[in-house]
Structure formats: structure tokens, C-alpha cells
Amino acid sequence: MLFNLFKFKGGVKPPTNKTQSTTLPIAAAPLPSRLVVPLHQSIGGTPRPVVEAGDRVLKGQLIGQADGWISAAVHAPTSGTVVEVAMHVQPHPSGLDALCVVIAPDGKDEWIARTPLDYAALTPEAVREHLQQSGVVGLGGAVFPTHGKLTASKTVPMEELIINGAECEPFITCDDLLMRERAEEVVRGIGIFRDLLQPKKVLIGIEDNKPEAAAAMRAAVETLGEDFAVVQVPTLYPAGGAKQLIRVLTGKEVPASKRSTDLGVQCFNVATAYTAWRAIAHGEPVVSRLVTVTGNVHHPRNYEVLIGTPMDELLKLAQPHPDTDGIIMGGPMMGFLVPQASVPVVKATNCLIAHDDRLFPPKAPEMPCIRCGACAQACPHELQPFEMYWFSRAKNFGKTQEYAIFDCIECGCCSFVCPSRIPLVQYFRFAKSEIWAREREKNAADQAKSRFEFKQLREEREKAEKAEKLAKAAAAQAAKKAAEAAAAAAAEAQPAAGEAAPASQAVAAVDPEKAAKRATIEAAMARAKAQREAAQPKNTDHLTPGQQKEVAEIEARRSGSRIEDRGSSEPAPAEPAAPTSPLDPNN
Amino acid sequence: MLPPAPFLLKDTSVSQVMIQVCVALIPGIAAYAWLVGPAILAQLVIATLAALAAEAAMLSLRGKPLGLFLSDGSAIVTAWLIALTFPPLAPWWLVATGTVFAIVVAKHLYGGLGQNPFNPAMVAFAVCIVSFPALMSQWPSIGLELPFVDQVNIILGLAPRVDALTGATPLDALKTALKLGDGSIDVVRLLADQDVYGNFAGRGWEWVAAGYLLGGLWLWHRQLITWHIPVAFVGALVAISGALWLFNPAQFANPLFHLFSGGAMLGAFFIATDPVSGCTTPRGKLIFGAGAGLLAYIIRVFGGYPDGVAFAVLLMNLCAPLIDLLTQPPIFGMKDKA
Ligand code: SF4
Ligand code: SF4
């Protein structure tokens, strides 16, 4: 098919390093010694644990209940026993803890009863709900709950559904292999999205360095008699960024202040489509994902990995060289070094790269900016990175916002090309987190101020009331004497009160052990919540359904700006440095 | 700790950029040494040494790591531009003073690499032509047959400076002739008759300029400069010189002559494109280049100095921050609103 492609400005061409991990087919990673499954694996509310230590669970059994509309359920990746529900270090650059369900596998890998759904017979609401209950989230790395993106805008007709198989980051090949080996199920999954969103066109974008994947997808589209267009897009990082891919395929530019659905476009990752199909047609919730294990290893390869698998156990399968000194989660452009090797694989983990100095030489010392403009030419969002750098460095954060720092997707193109070796993206992350922190302080101050004003108001009102009361009391004094006789009679009725309390205490004491455990978990959840709140000034916890919808929309819009095929852009979200800004001034 | 991504970086550095700029100057330098005289090579050495010494002194005064910054090559680029814009037989101390002034005052006193609002080489040129107008206007007469050693001796002050050795630049000669002739001179005949003129501009110099053009195109090909400034510079110069030439070909030289005379080519590709002191936005670069081209012509034709490139660039440097501020390009997704 002749297809008119558009270009986005900027972009870079780092060495792709993809062939190493595409020579072998996907392999199933063996059961690890234990699974640490974080409850918070998607954008939005932290699912509540519904199991306790000692419980036996089956593969696919619900262990974390979605909390609110923007949240997705979490399931046991295999059968076994819950060892604990406790705080563990997360695969996130901050190295913070979050609540996890730890499972000791029993080796049987025994499924729950899986019931396939005929989604054609269901209402769209029911399909969305099922996807939420199956834990389907964006597997490109943004981990936004998929059901939240499957409602078309009411005012703008849905024109294009974009399926992101671009996979532009170097080293990562999990989507490539998925499309090569499981194209048919991917295409069927796309069919579900199509039916829910009713777009005019479905465009599957694949970078032209993956001819096998494109051929497999074309064949699958043909076999299934769909009219999806498989389009090969030029290999140029970050062509797999949702906004860049939308631009390339449709010519539309989604600004940071808008949702893609406002422009009649929606975008999903191929792996997301695949898991959606598995969830609907096989009743399998998301308990595993494909992970590329590559870098400084003997046998780079793609593995089907259970969520919760400790990264060091997974890395061992590919036999890392002895000089490996760290694990990068995600690609080399946007990934991060995990805080410790034993952190679990999560839904956002698309790639592990064994790090060493040969592959990733230590950076040369930073020099002053020479204003060469290379960064601006490379920026896919057409920003002026050196100006933002200048003002970030000077801590003039207002100016950085004038230069649209919140439109920066942290793709790293600018750092990549800078001859002065300035870690520009780090400066931008720093500036953004400072801006959020200030915003938070300001909110807190505003709250304190309004509390104070309220208190004053109340005191004044009370004073007024008191004066009124005094006046009344004086009037009442006269009546009182007359009533004294009646009061003496009433005094006799008093002793009956105060006997209900002991009963409720007895109820609580029925199972002190369980109660204690529950209390620990509750405390942990509260801590996590407090941590999250301290980190992100969201109060999305007690919202009306209407507010939740609104939040969902905002989140959807925000996630539209994510690079779809990486892990770092939307790190396991309970943490402070999460690059989404709740205060994005454009929202 | 903030994540240090990206882990992959392009193989590039400030030194690489600067070295490539130097490489791009080589065709012009070769033509210069061959057609005008090898004295330029001595000047390049003098300027380089002076620049490195001044740079090292300033860096240690400012407590900056010597090795890192000395090897960035920026001082060498400045030195070479100074050597290439000064008269090749100028005494060594003139070039050295200019270079030291450029490095110490125009660069380091403003904050060093990346901070200078004015192009240091052009500051040196402007300061020297104002302070030593006579020395700065003594250009070797073309076809000067003088052994290299003697040329070096003149530069070093070991041999007397003989006035006969030096003449005016083609641009200056034209200007003087026009002034003296007071309207009676026909430029076309002048260019055809006089010895100092070659095929389309100054004899010899035209090929030096062509060498700069070649190097400049290579810089563009290597994506070290964008097309905006050179194209705007050349375009503006051609436009204004062409208009006046069409208006009165007897009084004004043709555009080709202007393009290949004086510092036009060097200015368009190597001086106005200095990113530190120039504009950075695409539209800003167009304005900057066009402004520099126009001013260069006006100063060289109507002003008191033989060439106008240096002053033109300095004047535009002055406007660059404002131009940048006013020409910010719209960002992704905001184009219809801007
Ligand atoms: S690439 Fe680096 S040196 Fe060049 S303008 Fe950008 S920040 Fe400055
Ligand atoms: S990290 Fe931000 S500023 Fe840098 S190139 Fe990417 S979008 Fe532009």
C-alpha cells in the first residue's frame, strides 16, 4: 500500500544493537525461587492486597484489587504460597520501597479456572471492566491502565487507531519478537481495540529495521481478513514515542496540553494488544511479559518472564560476563540503573541490559555549553534544550517553564548529541522535580492559610454565639427556677448509659493474630500512601466517580506523551521522581 | 541520585567540533600560503602559541582544569581566525597582542568558553585596526617575490619593513581609486586593467576566498553549521551589491567581486556562524546572517575601513540575544497557535 508518511523534527540515530537478541526465539524463563509482585504496577491508585501470608494462591488469582477507575488489578504469576505482604525495594531509580506480595512457587504452575469471553456479546463497559480486572496496562513502558484509554472522545470522531510496534530504543527487541512469533494474537487484540473505539483507520507502525516483524504482521492481518495498514516507518529514535509515531503516521501533532483523542487518535503498544487478547479470549490476566535480556551477556535473548521474577535470576539465564556492574531497566536512552539486582520484573520492564564500561563508556567531563544548537536540532519536541539548561542551572524555574520544560519527554536526544557532554536531561528532571516541590509547598501553604482563616472565622462566630448564649441564659435564668422541681425527677434516669462498649471490643478480639497482620498491612499501605502523597501532590484517593473519570482523562492525556516502548519513562509509580507532573501547567 | 540516562552518547566533543573547524580552514589557508605568501603559516604559529599561552594563564588564574580546557581547541580556532584576518606581514607582536586580547578580555573576562557575547577574533581585529590603523592596512603586494625566511624576518622585526613590499587590498585599492577619481573612474575598466585584480575579484585572494567557501560547505555537510547564516549573509551581500551595481555599474563593483573579496567568505562561513556569539534560532540565524552581510557591505563600501566584516559581525553580536528572544520557534504541537 502506498502510504504517505510525515516527518517529525529532530531525532537521533544511536547504534541499534538489536540483532544480538533476535537470533534466538522467545524462551520461557523457568520458575524463579520466589516472586516479589509489587501491588502498584500501573499509573493510578495502588491496588489493595486481598491475600495474606500463608494463603495458597493459584496462577492468575487476584492478589491486588484495583483501587479506583484508574488502577489495574494484580494477579499471582504462578501457584504457590504467599510468604508475606511487605515493603520491598522497587525497580525505580529512587530505590524506594513499596508494598509487594511475595510468593513461594509450588512448582505446579496451576491456573485458576480460566473463562474465555465472547467480547462481541458484551457491552463496551463490561469489556473495559474485564480488561481492568485482568490487569491489562500499557506494556510499552507507560503502564497506563488500558481500559482507561478505550473510550472515544464524545465530541471528536475517532479517526486513527495507532498501534505502536516501532520499538525505537536501541537493544530492545521484545516487541519485535512478539510480532514475529505471535502476530496473529496481536492482530486479534488490535481488533478488540478497534471494536471499542470504532476508528476510521487502524495503522500499525513498525520501524523499518524490523522487516520480519512487519512481514509477520502483514501476513496475520491478511489471514484474519482485517483492513489494518502495516506501515514501516523510518528508523529514527524516538519514532516509538507515542506523539512521534502519531505524527509520522497521521501528520497530527498532539501538544502537551491535549489528549490524543481530542485530535481523533489513540495509540497502543503491540504487547498491550496481545495481553488484551489473552485476557479476553483465554481468560488469562497479565502475569508475565516478554523481556529482552541483553548487553554484556553471553546469550542475549527474549524471555517470557513472570511478573515478580527477581532481575538477577533472570539475568543469569543469559549468562552475564563477570565484569557486569549493573542492570539497566529499559533502553540505553531512557532506562535507568536499578537500585539493586534483586528487584522484581514488573509490567513496565521491557528490557534488562547488563551494564559494563565497554558498552557504555563513562562519560567525559562536562564542558560549558557552546550554544552550538545541536541539542535543539535533535529535540523531537522542537524545544530549546540549551536555554532550558541555562535556566535550570541558574534555578530560574519560571523561565524553564516559559521554554516549555514540561513538553520535554526526557527522550535524551539532546544529551546524546551534546558535544559538551552536558547531561541535559538530568538538569530537566531536576528542574521539573523542583517545580513540583515548590508547587506542593505552595499548596500546603495555601491550605494552612485557608485553615487559619477558617479558624478565625469560626472563633468570631463562636464569640458571637457566646454573646447570644449569654443573653439567652439571662433570659433563661428566670424560667429555670420554675423548672427546678421537674429537673429533680429527671435525674433519676441517668445510670442506664455506657454499657454498649465492651461488646464491640469482643468482636474485634475474635482473631487477634489476623487483626494484627491486617493492621501491619494497613499500616504499610498507609505508609505507601503517605509516601506517594508526599511525593506527588495528588488527592485522588477519595473521589466521586465523576472526579475519577476526570482524573482518568487527564492521566490518559498525559500518558499520550509517553514514549511507548520503554520502561523508564513511567517508572513504577509510587515514587517521587515519576516524570508525570500532576501539575503540568498545560493540563 | 538522578538517573544518568542516556547511557549511549554520540561520539562527539567540543575538541572534535573545533578540530573540524580548523580542518575546514585548511583549503583557504593552502591557497593563501600558495598564492599570497607563506608568511601566513608563520602568523598561524604565532597566533596559536599566543592563544594557548593566554588561555593557559587565564585558566589557571580562574582555577579551571588546564588539560580539559586547553584541549578543547576553541582558543586555536580564535587564533587562526585572527591570523587569517590580520595582514600576513604584520609584526609578530601585533598578532600576538590581538590574540592575547581576544583570549583574555573578549573570552575569559566574560566567563570563558561559551560565555563571550562577542566573537573574540573580531574583537581583536576591531581593537587592532582602531589602535594600529597603519600596520593593519599594510598588505603584501601580490606577486611579491620574497623568500619565506625574509618574510619571517620581517614579521619578527629582524628585517626592516619596506613600504614597497606592501600595498592595499583589492577592496581598499578600489575604494581609494574611486575616491581619488571622484566620479571619473569606471569600475569595470579598473577591475579589468589593474594588476591587483584577477579573474573575478582580487588576484590570488579570490582563490583564498574560494578555499574558505569549500571548507564552509564541508562544515555544512558535516552538520557543524546550518545553512541559515551563510546563505543569509551571502544572499544579503549579493542583494545589496547587486542592486547598487545594476543601478550604477561604473561606480559599484559587481556582487561576485564583493563575495570573493576581503573577509566575506570567511565571515559568512566561519565567523558569523560562531554559535556562542551568534543567534541560535533558525529565523534568528537568517536575520543575523542577513544583517551581517548588509552591514559588511555598507561599511566596506561607504565606511572608513577597508573591510566591514568584523564590525558587521560585532554589531550583530550585540543584537543576537534580542533577535533570539523574538524569534523563538513554535514547539511540537503548538504551530497553529504561534
Ligand atoms: S548541544 Fe550542548 S553545547 Fe550544544 S547548545 Fe546544546 S547544550 Fe549547548
Ligand atoms: S529530552 Fe526533552 S529537551 Fe531533550 S531532546 Fe528529548 S524532549 Fe527535547
Image: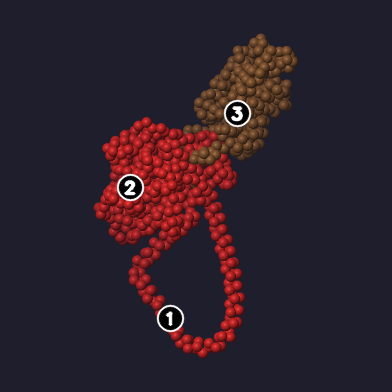
State the hue of chain A. Answer: red
Q: Which quadrant of the rendered structure holds the N terminus of chain A?
A: top left
- Find residue A276 and name its label: 2
The one of B190 and B171 positioned closer to us in this rendering: B190
Question: What's the residue type where badge 2 is placed?
Answer: Ala
Quarter of the image holding residue B286? top right
Mark 3: which secondary structure? helix
| Left or right: A301 as drawn, with respect to B293 | left
In which quadrant of the rendered view does residue A368 lie?
top right
Please name the residue that numbered disc 1 is placed on. A497
Q: Is mark 1 within 8 Å of ligand 2?
A: no
Q: Which chain is tinted brown?
A: B
Front residue of B123 and B173: B173
Q: Chain of mark 3?
A: B
Circle 3 residue: B289
Identify residue type, mark 3. Gly
Residue at x 35%, y 42% (from the top left corner): A270
Q: CA distance from mark 2 to mark 3?
A: 56 Å
Rounded to the nearest whole Å, what is the CA distance between mark 1 and mark 3? 92 Å
**Residue shown at the point (63%, 28%) measured from the top left:** B292
Crowd class of label 1 (few under 14; some 14 to 19; many from 20; radius 10 Å)? few
Does the numbered disc 2 mark a residue whose Cβ is under 8 Å from ligand 2? no
**Image side of residue A437 versus residue A264, left or right:** right
The chain under label 1 reads A
Q: Earlier in the sequence, mark 1 or mark 2?
A: 2
Pointers 2 and 3 in contact (CB under 8 A)?
no
Q: Residues within 10 Å of mark 3 (few under 14, many from 20)?
A: many
Is A213 displayed left or right of A452 in the figure?
A: left
Circle 1: residue type: Ala
Mark 2 element type: helix
Work out how far the residue at label 1 is from the one at label 2, CA to CA, in angstroms. Answer: 59 Å
